[in-house]
Amino acid sequence: MAAGATTNADAGLKVSRLDHISLQVSDLQRSREFYGNVFTASVNRTPRPDNEVRLDLADNALLVLRRAGVPGQVNHLGMKVEGFNRASVAQQLRGSGITPVDEPNVPGTAGFHVVDPDGFRVQLL
């Protein structure tokens, strides 16, 4: 996102729901047990068993635990955008002064990331 960029209400994207939040953890098993025991989160899938587990939470939201980077940090938020179309959403954001941050194509991922004014990554899906 360009520093100081803002969007106006007429050009805003309509988020239908929070899809996921990704946390960086030091011990994947310990974190998995914590969220499972305290919040009854159940394993959705484990795409990379040594580095990542995805847990089901309420309202179809996922909690993604990643053993990467600095523990205790939010890696990114994932938001579902109504009627998401990668090209048109990217164009709309660019028109508002926000530059999408494309990451390498990940199988099964159609979205992309933007960065908020404080540096948090937000994945749009």
Image (cartoon, rainbow, N blue to C red):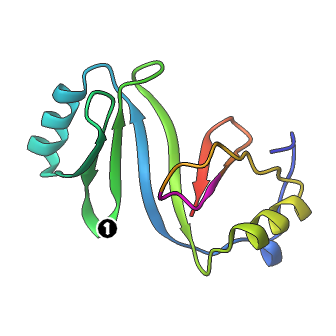
Residue found 59% across the figure and 78% down from its top: 82
Q: Tell me residue 81's x, y (percent).
A: 59, 71
Q: Please tell me whether residue 64 is drawn above or below residue 30 in the rendered image.
A: below
Expressed as whole percent of the image width and height from the top left, the position of residue 32 reads 19, 36
Q: Is residue 23 left or right of residue 115?
A: left
Q: Which residue is mark 1?
A: 60
64 in the magenta segment: no
Residue type at numbered disc 1: Asn
Residue 70: x percent and y percent?
A: 46, 18
Residue depicted at x 26% and y 64%: 58
Determine crowd level at label 1: few under 14, some 14-19, many 20+ residues with C-alpha closer than 10 A. few
Which residue does the image show at 69% across and 71% down from the upper left? 13
The one nearer the camera, 13 or 54, is 54
Please give left or right for residue 106 compared with residue 55 in the image.
right
Could you tell me which quadrant the N terminus lies in? top right
- In magenta, the rendered stretch is 108-112
